[in-house]
Amino acid sequence: MSVNKEWTPNIVAFCCNWCSYAGADLAGSGRMNYPANVKIIRIPCSCRLNPMFVLRAFQRGADGVILCGCHPGDCHYSTGNYYARRRMTVLFSLLDFMGIERGRTRVEWVSAAEGAKFAATMNDFVKTVTELGENKKLGDLRCKK
Amino acid sequence: MQEMIVNRLRELLASGDYAGVIGWSKGETPFDRTPGLFTEKDLDRLCYDSFCGSNLSKYLIANAKDKKVIALLKPCDCYSFNQMCTEHRIQRENVYVIGVGCKGKIDGEKIRNGGIKGITGVSEEGDLLKIETLYGEKEISRKDVLLDKCLSCKGKEHKCADEVIGESEDTSVGNKYELVEKLDAMTPEERFEFWRGELSKCIRCNACRNACPACSCIKCVFDNPKSGVENKAAADDFEENLFHIIRAYHVAGRCTDCGECSRACPQGIPLHLLNRKIIKDINELYGDYQAGEEIGQRHPLTDFTFEDDEPSVVERRGGGK
């Protein structure tokens, strides 16, 4: 087996069960391409995302974290994504304040019908993070030996 | 003022309605004040002067649970008290709040850092501090050695007092967001270096967590041995980062900006800047909000409007390059 020595980013995508996860499914069944370094974690609602999850993902070697949820107004639980929107804004701003590059975190609303948008979003996000390079600032070096 | 307070406390305690008083007593050094619960017997030990900087609201969570107590609160402590009442951590009816006058509290560290050594005692005369040292007596102005948190004073009004003893004074100077704005104007690399420098000093004593009135969960994620960040020995490299981000974020919207985190930090890390950044963001994005202004407020992160900005606003907003 040949080992690919070239660095590719590790991306963690938190997807809400009702919209974005189904959107990712649609992207798959529609045979659309998106990079294999995106690891999807399903959460019940975008507002399930504890900020600790984001930091843990970075600590355990993620180079970028993206949250995908239902469009505002379409949340399965009516209002979850409105709360997530405020929380993530404040968290991202705090990370920025501590000097973590802004491009490493993103929130994108993807509905179950938007397989193409899901693929496009992931392609774009992976491109952004690849340009930023490896996440050293928030990473826990123990996990990278 | 101490005499007035003690006399009033004697009256109140004699009624037998209250189990005790939450207040301060003299500590080991001339400017060390230890919080404690006082009963009628040991009321003589109670002390109130310019060194009682610590916020007593937090102690009411444990002490006012199943009994009625009297609390001595400064104007800034009232905000934390209201916030804790809002969160049902303190039963308002269990606490009789005596608002005590405050004209700014003094930072012992600042006296020492000013080059005054061998301090054996301190006394006050108006705006002057008379410091007795092994090498003779010295005088300094109170204004020069106020606690950092007093420089961003929230005002002289007691927001929750049942009665007020003594006069207060607003000691705020300048723009409290000055340092936050200065950091915002740096490049991300400079900011990162700044925080790495500051947070690397952290010894994970958890004093910031334990002093913070808002940070009072019954079970804390950082006490979990499986978390890998339980203590300094378990933490590695920049691990403290995670702790401090979560500590600051966890009180987002609930932080009253009382400044206890920085005051309690033995390493002098300006931890309140993280909280103040969050407060500034919330004020700018979701409208002005002061946690603990009154009991029963709904804080901005448990609220929303349909027109809120998307998180990508962080990339567009000013600050840094």
Image (cartoon, helix red, strand yellow):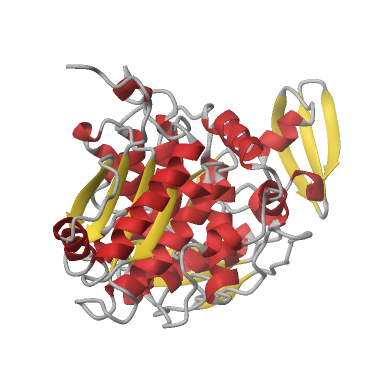
Residue B283 in the image, given as x and y percentages of width and height: 58, 70
The correct choice, above or below, for B119 with respect to A34 in the image is above
The correct choice, above or below, for A69 with respect to B261 in the image is below
The quarter of the rendered structure image containing the N terminus of chain B is: bottom right
Residue B151, quarter of picture:
bottom right
Residue B237, quarter of picture:
top left
**Residue placed most toward the observer, B281 or B209:** B281
Q: Residue at x 34, y 77 (%)?
A: A72
Does residue B163 appear in this view?
yes
The correct choice, above or below, for B150 with respect to B225 in the image is below
Residue B82, quarter of picture:
bottom left
Residue A18 in the image, given as x and y percentages of width and height: 17, 69
**Residue placed most toward the observer, B134 or B146:** B146
Residue B73 in the image, given as x and y percentages of width and height: 52, 64
Q: Residue at x 16, y 16 (%)?
A: A1
In the image, farthest residue toward the front = A31
Q: Residue at x 42, y 79 (%)?
A: B297
Does residue B15 appear in this view?
no
Looking at the rendered structure, the number of numbered marks drawn on it comes to: 0
Residue B258 in the image, given as x and y percentages of width and height: 55, 57
**Residue placed most toward the observer, A94 or B81:** A94
Q: Residue at x 79, y 26 (%)?
A: B115
